[in-house]
Image (cartoon, rainbow, N blue to C red):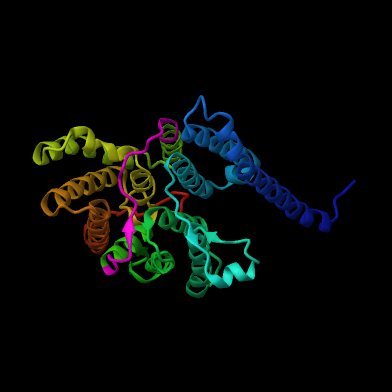
């Protein structure tokens, strides 16, 4: 029996609807049963451990539902990882904020919605901004993995009692990719630029998630395991490892200079902010230099700059500022050197290889 054209069209739609329904059922069941699970095991296990264990089960179930889709497109691997970071970090020590719903929203929903998560609204804003600007500038619909990562990163990192900083940071992050460019590349990691801009322009309204250590070893272990595997598969594992290889000895230097315990200087390694930083900001394919060795050198320079800013200026946002300074500078130097070599090519007869990044993750 042969399939009719209408069958071949409807099957993918039906498949998507089934997966979406299963996703809604899994998430709905998680929120419906989470409180009961905490109460049932409250006498034997720490509540955070119970929440983390339940979250891991839910994430594994969702991965199973969407695995055929995720497996075919490696650009979904990084969004999945950042979702894991969000879910486990919130389950471990509640990093997400909830804001009171405005009166019009409470009235519109008959009092059913009394609060909302700015994180999820920010994700919607970055996705819509990417769709609109990408279509306007490039004339085609962009892949939304980058917008998803930017939205969820801003939602995790931003701390504010108002909603407008979340929305503004999300839009600025996306727009920076299209405005602040050199040649065919944008210079700043979108979230790094957006967060740095808001922290500078509106410090009285905006704060950032601190580099405090996570308090649940299971959550940290799962995040690092998945992060390492995904970065290895994307051939970018050397970048976070180079940064950590520099960050750890520099932590002991900072301890000697400041008289802080060395454990305090190493503690950021387990924080959600640090994990976002090493797995997404410094590894962003569109804003890192080309070549494995050069990427490792820049990662080390970012770590050195972070320590210098912290020691010299007591900079509490040194991670953001170090990448904000070093990353674009390295990209500009690479562009200038590449163009200079290209001009010399006819005279020397040497062939200069094109700077191509084949990474499947777009920013």
- Quadrant where the C terminus sits is bottom left
| Residue displayed at 53% across by 63% down | 124
Q: Main secondary structure of the magenta part?
A: loop
49, above or below 143, in the image: above
| Residue displayed at 33% across by 69% down | 180
Q: Nearer the viewer, residue 179 or 17?
A: 17
Question: Would residue 212 be counted in the magenta stretch?
Answer: yes
Decide if residue 5 is on the left or right side of residue 293. Answer: right
- The quadrant where residue 279 appears: top left
Q: Nearer the viewer, residue 93 or 192?
A: 93
| Residue farthest to the top, as pictured | 44
Decide if residue 192 is on the left or right side of residue 309. Answer: right
85, above or below 189, in the image: above
- The quadrant where residue 342 appears: bottom left
Q: Where is residue 106? Give x, y as percent.
A: 59, 67
Decide if residue 211 is on the left or right side of residue 75. Answer: left
Q: Where is residue 118? Give x, y as percent.
A: 48, 60
* Residue 360 visible in the displayed image: yes
* Residue 363 visible in the displayed image: no
| Residue farthest to the left, as pictured | 257
80, above or below 149, in the image: above
Q: Nearer the viewer, residue 140 or 304?
A: 304
Residue span colored magenta:
201-220
| Residue displayed at 50% across by 47% down | 83
Question: Would residue 110 be counted in the magenta stretch?
Answer: no
| Residue displayed at 52% across by 45% down | 80
Q: Nearer the viewer, residue 25 or 39?
A: 39
Q: Where is residue 230? Give x, y as percent.
A: 46, 39
């Amino acid at each position: 029996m042969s399939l009719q054209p209408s069958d071949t069209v409807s099957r993918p739609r039906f498949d998507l609807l089934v997966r979406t329904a299963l996703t809604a059922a899994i998430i709905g069941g998680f929120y419906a049963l989470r409180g009961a699970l905490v109460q049932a095991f409250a006498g034997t296990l720490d509540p955070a451990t119970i929440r983390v264990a339940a979250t891991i089960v839910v994430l594994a179930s969702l991965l199973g539902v969407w695995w055929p889709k995720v497996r075919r497109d490696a650009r979904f691997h990084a969004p999945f990882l950042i979702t894991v970071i969000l879910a486990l970090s919130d389950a471990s020590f509640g990093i997400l904020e909830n804001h009171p719903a405005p009166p019009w929203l409470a009235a519109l929903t008959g009092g059913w919605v009394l609060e909302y998560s700015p994180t999820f609204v920010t994700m919607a804003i970055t996705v819509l901004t990417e769709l609109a600007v990408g279509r306007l500038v490039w004339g085609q619909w962009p892949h939304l993995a980058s917008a998803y990562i930017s939205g969820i990163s801003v939602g995790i990192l931003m701390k504010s009692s108002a909603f407008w900083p979340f929305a503004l940071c999300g839009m600025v992050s996306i727009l920076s990719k299209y405005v602040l460019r050199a040649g065919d590349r944008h210079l700043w990691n979108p979230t790094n630029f957006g967060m740095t801009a808001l922290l500078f322009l509106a410090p009285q309204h905006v704060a950032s998630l601190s580099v405090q250590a996570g308090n649940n070893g299971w959550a940290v272990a799962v995040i690092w395991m998945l992060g390492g595997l995904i970065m290895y598969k994307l051939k970018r594992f050397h970048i976070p490892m180079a940064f950590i290889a520099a960050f750890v000895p520099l932590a002991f230097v900072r301890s000697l200079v400041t008289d802080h315990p060395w454990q305090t200087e190493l503690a950021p390694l387990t924080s959600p902010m640090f994990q976002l930083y090493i797995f997404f900001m410094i590894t962003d394919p569109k804003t890192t230099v080309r070549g494995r060795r050069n990427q490792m050198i820049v990662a080390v320079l970012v770590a050195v700059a972070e320590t210098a800013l912290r020691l010299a200026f007591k900079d509490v946002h040194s991670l953001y500022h170090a990448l904000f300074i070093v990353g674009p500078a390295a990209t500009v130097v690479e562009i200038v050197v590449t163009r200079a070599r290209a001009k010399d090519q006819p005279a020397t007869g040497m062939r200069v290889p094109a700077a191509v990044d084949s990474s499947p993750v777009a920013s």
